[in-house]
Structure formats: structure tokens, C-alpha cells
Image (cartoon, rainbow, N blue to C red):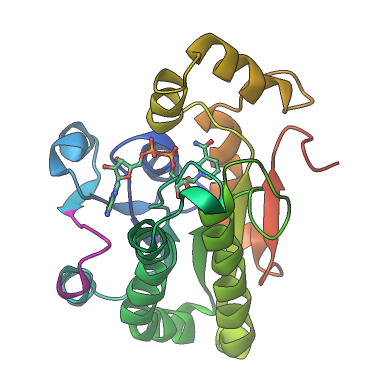
Amino acid sequence: MRLKGKRILITAAGQGMGRASALACAAEGGKIIATDRDIALLDDLAGQGIEIAALDVTDPQAITRLADSVGPLDGLFNCAGFVHHGTILDISDEDWAFSMDLNVTSMLRLTRACLPGMLTRAADTGTASILNMASMASSIKGFPNRTAYGTTKAAVIGLTKGIAADFVRQGIRCNALCPGTVDTPSLRGRIATAADPVQAEKEFIARQPMGRLATVEDITPMVIYLLSDESRLVTGQALLVDGGVTI
Ligand code: NAD
């Protein structure tokens, strides 16, 4: 039970890596609060000992309300994010603002709202952990048609390092998770809407030297590690789980 008794809030837990993380962390004894914009996607998690709550991470009032209602946390996993497809020539001001708001500002707001409670937990227990979802597509590596996305995920790494530096002496750790290409519903959507879906899937696989897409189960062990005390000396890092893309 690597997360026994730890109260952990996860955003975008309705599907994909957020959902898999909620289930995996609960299986390790975590007291999980799974949130998503679409509460219907969380219904069946409620039957598995997980608290659920609606949260659109782009709604500042909803963030404040939720942070107040959940009380002090031991862990926070900011998982919500959106992939904009296109070069800089395709990015409207509205697209840019939307990506920054959903992928970066939401993490700032939710972390700012939860941090006072996490500091009280860390004062009691010695530690609390924040995990921010970044990507290999970030300051780490550029990819075609990912300028807006990569910029936001680079900002997530910057946000992560800033939080880590400011609170390292108060028991707060903050790290960024940088997956490769993971087989999730939104990836399937990106493949389905490509001009040639069969070719698009081949290209996603081809860029992973290990020869396959990641599964959500490839990612959750790193989530558990970073939210648990096993990673007690790890902070301010961007940790890759990318099937060898960035070797
Ligand atoms: P996904 O994109 O399939 O699911 C995302 C979930 O987010 C959905 O349940 C959706 O309802 C929820 N959501 C969307 N907008 C929201 C909002 N405003 N507030 C709250 N919830 C909202 O899941 P995924 O592919 O596992 O992606 C999760 C995170 O991982 C994202 O930040 C993404 O950028 C990142 N990521 C994904 C991949 C990949 O290949 N899938 C790789 C690296 C990083």
C-alpha cells in the first residue's frame, strides 16, 4: 500500500491517464478525489471507493469552491490538458488563449488554491506532493503541429520548477510527468480525425523507438511513485516515460 491514507485530488479523471491514475492510486490505498468536467464519466469510480466531484479546471470559482470543500490534501495531480493541432500559422489568438488557460493557468489556480492545505499536511507529516502533467512535447522536444501544445507543456515544466524551488524547505515536492504517445480516448480521436487515420496511427507508433504506443498502465507506476514517499528526494524534475523517443 504505497499511498496508504494519502488524500489525493486528480483532475481529468474521467478517462485516459487521469482515470487510470485514480484507479491505480486507490488500489495503493490512496483516498482519491477524482474530478472531471464531465461528471458522468466518473460515475462508476464512485462505486469503487473513490470520491467524485465535477470540476471544469477553466472555471476559477469552481476551483475555489472545490479546494475549500476537500480540505487539506497530501497529493494533487493536475492532469487536465488539451492538444492543439497545427503550426504557428494555424494558431488563432483564441486557440492560444484556450490552450494556455486549460493547460497552464488551470494548474496555477488549482495548485494555488490547494497549497495552503498541503502546507499544513506537510507540516504534520513532513511531505506533500504535486504532480503536473506535461509531455515529451514541451521544452524537451519539438514535434510537427504541436507549437501551441508544446509551449503550454514547456510552461508546465517552468511552473513545476518554480513551485518546487519556493516550497522545498516546507515539505512540498512538485514534479512534472512527461509521457510519450499514450493510447487514450483523445489520442484515438486525433487519429480518427486525421486525413488518413491508418497512416496517422502508423506515424504515431513509428516515432516511438520501442515500437508501440504507451498504454495508461505504462504511465501509472510513475504517477504512484511521484505521489508516494518513495520519491521523497525527487522535486522540480520533468520525468519522461516515452518509450525511448528522447534517447
Ligand atoms: P484524454 O485527453 O483522453 O481525457 C481527458 C479528460 O479531460 C476527459 O475525461 C475530459 O472530460 C477531461 N477534460 C477536458 N477538459 C476539461 C476541463 N476543462 N476540466 C476538467 N476536465 C476536462 O486523456 P489523456 O490523453 O490521458 O490526457 C491527459 C493529459 O495527459 C493531458 O494533459 C494531455 O495533454 C497529457 N498527455 C497526453 C498524452 C497522450 O499521448 N495521450 C501524452 C502526453 C501528455
* In the depicted structure, whether residue 26 falls above or below residue 63: above
In-image side of 147 versus 118 (left or right): right
* In the depicted structure, whether residue 49 falls above or below residue 226: above
Q: Position of residue 92 (x, y in %)?
A: 39, 57
Q: Main secondary structure of the magenta part?
A: loop
Q: Does residue 118 appear in this view? A: yes
For the point 37% across and 43% down, the residue is: 22
- The answer to which of 119 and 132 lies nearer the viewer is 132
- In this view, the residue farthest toward the right is 247
In-image side of 80 versus 67 (left or right): right
Ligand 1: which quarter? top left
- In this view, the residue farthest toward the front is 89
Q: Position of residue 211 (x, y in %)?
A: 74, 18
- The answer to which of 86 and 210 lies nearer the viewer is 86
The C terminus - image quarter? top right
* In the depicted structure, whether residue 157 falls above or below residue 37: below
For the point 55% across and 80% down, the residue is: 163
Q: Which residues are magenta?
A: 54-61
Q: Does residue 228 appear in this view? A: no
Residue 111 falls within the magenta-colored stretch: no
For the point 52% across and 51% down, the residue is: 89
Q: Position of residue 21 (x, y in %)?
A: 43, 42
Residue 55 falls within the magenta-colored stretch: yes
For the point 48% across and 77% down, the residue is: 125
**Quadrant hosting residue 116:** bottom left
- The answer to which of 220 and 111 lies nearer the viewer is 111
- The answer to which of 97 and 116 lies nearer the viewer is 97
* In the depicted structure, whether residue 163 falls above or below residue 179: below
Q: Position of residue 36 (x, y in %)?
A: 24, 49
